[in-house]
Image (cartoon, grey):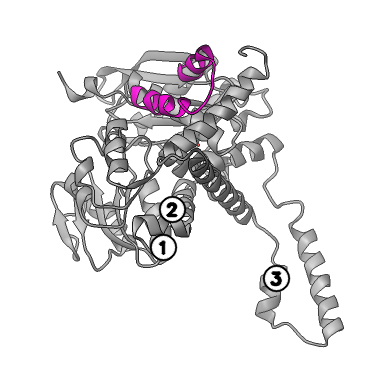
Amino acid sequence: MSKKIEYSLFDDVSGFVDDAAKHLDLHPGLLDQIKQCNSIYKFNFPLRNDDGTYETLTGYRIQHSHHKLPVKGGIRYSEHVDEEEVKGLAALMTYKCALVNVPFGGAKGGVSIDPLKYNEGQMERITRRYTAELIKKKFIGPAIDVPAPDYGTGAREMAWIVDTFEAFNPELINAKGAVTGKPLSQHGIDGRTEATGQGVFFGIREAVSVEDDMQALGLTVGLKGKRIIIQGLGNVGYYSAKYLSEAGAKIVGVAEWNGGIWDESGIDIEALKTYQIENKGFKGFKKGEFIKNSKELLTYPCDILVPAALENQITKENAAQIQAKIIGEAANGPVTNEAEKILLKNGVMVIPDMYLNAGGVTVSYFEWLKNLSRVSFGKLEKRYDMEKYRKLLGTIENATGERFTDDEKDGLIKGASERDLVLSGLEETMVTAYHDMNRTRKEKGIQSLRTAGFILALQRIAISYMDLGIFP
Ligand code: GLU
């Protein structure tokens, strides 16, 4: 039997939900309703290749929970995409949105392809056809289901999706809100590209700021000097590594699917990323040691391990060898249920995916709001605020007889740009959710932050059903 069949992300997520439900008094019927996927759409469609041959591709869009609409979640292009994976990822979106208070149900989509095997023209045809299949069944729309980027997709694919959606819905004034993660020229939002990594940074920063938690782990407070290993240097891994190292942490290892780099003196992330783009991997990078079997890097000595690639990376096979004190799940589902039990027994703190990578969907929410209002954040009040602060500074100068320097003045007067507001909203979301989750963990006397996160999410989702009188 292949490994793929044994492992089910959806079953793993359901197991985490069950662990949390033990601490709540939910009607079993309600718990079952929450856990199951509301709608599953699987379809096959043809792709005509440049040489005239055809292939049949399989696509999915799975809506896990309609307790809030629209549903929200990315589209993944990878060879691993199958129904179990998309179901699991869709379910995670539901709990993630509930935990960080973003008013969406969860969904996920995907096409089972290796995107590296197709050229740009083929990718465009696949994406537009995929979108048309969603439109046919009303599985996309600003009030229904709003896709976004995920592993193997980005702003380019989102531009094709919105363009296709608009072509089919020319009368819909909110059509731009049918997908997020779009390029800025297509009404995207400033800061969405780096949002997930930025959120990972805020989340880890909060975790290491809690003195008693760090003491229990035998770590000092703060990011300065913390040794970090990152798995995956794609969008999420790269921005996480960038912000963490800018805050004083030391990236000592980076693992990619085709090899890793280990350097205890600290890796220059910008240089490594540039090298990776030019050479399609790390082999030959001038500094550090090349590690052929990069999976081994996960067990190297460090303070924080950040898996930022795919699910099912830390399993019962390697969990006991993990030396990190903290695992920050930037990817979805990197630690299996069985592995987490081993890690907790060994005193490792796991900052769960449903919280740590919620920065992406949080900023997607801001993008969707921008699209519905058709005005960028800060556009109306920026000048007004600047004028008000200018007058205030003038009043202070007159009253005190002192003068601000030009630099001080510029800093104080500057009105908030769209990017400033996005960052502020993201930071607020990540800070609040971390402490909500950690407080719940302590109140319930449990060790697992993930269980605490699921408890909070379940409570919020359950209320939506109970207030409708569907369940007692
Ligand atoms: N794919 C991202 C995630 O897993 C973002 C989803 C979104 O922005 O809707 O959270």
Question: Does ligand 1 reach within 8 Å of label 2's beta carbon?
Answer: no
- Residues packed near mark 3 inside 10 Å, few (<14), some (14 to 19) or many (20 plus): some
Describe residue 12's horizontal placement relative to residue 204 as left or right: left
Secondary structure of the residue carrying tag 1 is loop
- Mark 1 highlights which residue? 223
Q: Residue at x 85, y 76 (%)?
A: 395
Q: Position of residue 266 (x, y in %)?
A: 27, 66
Residue 320 shows up from this direction:
yes
Label 2 – label 3 distance at C-alpha: 29 Å
Q: Are marks 2 and 3 in contact (CB under 8 Å)?
A: no
Q: CA distance from mark 1 to mark 3?
A: 28 Å
Q: Residue at x 41, y 63 (%)?
A: 223
* Residue 204 image label: 2
Mark 1–mark 3 CB contact (< 8 Å): no
- Residue 53 on the magenta segment: no
Q: Amino acid at mark 2?
A: Ile
Q: For the magenta stretch, what is the residue range?
A: 11-37
* Crowd class of label 1 (few under 14; some 14 to 19; many from 20; radius 10 Å): many
Q: Earlier in the sequence, mark 1 or mark 3?
A: 1
Q: Residue at x 55, y 39 (%)?
A: 100
The reply to whether callout 1 and callout 2 are in contact (CB within 8 Å) is: yes
Instruction: Look at label 1 and name its amino acid.
Output: Leu
* SS for dot 3: helix
Q: Say which of 114 and 66 sits in front.
A: 66
**Is residue 5 shown above or below 286?**
above
Q: Position of residue 52 (x, y in %)?
A: 26, 20
Q: Position of residue 217 (x, y in %)?
A: 35, 55
Q: Nearer the viewer, residue 179 or 261?
A: 261
**What residue is disc 3 on?**
412
**As rendered, which of 275 and 352 lies closer to the eye?**
352
Magenta-highlighted stretch: main secondary structure?
helix
Q: Nearer the viewer, residue 288 or 136?
A: 288
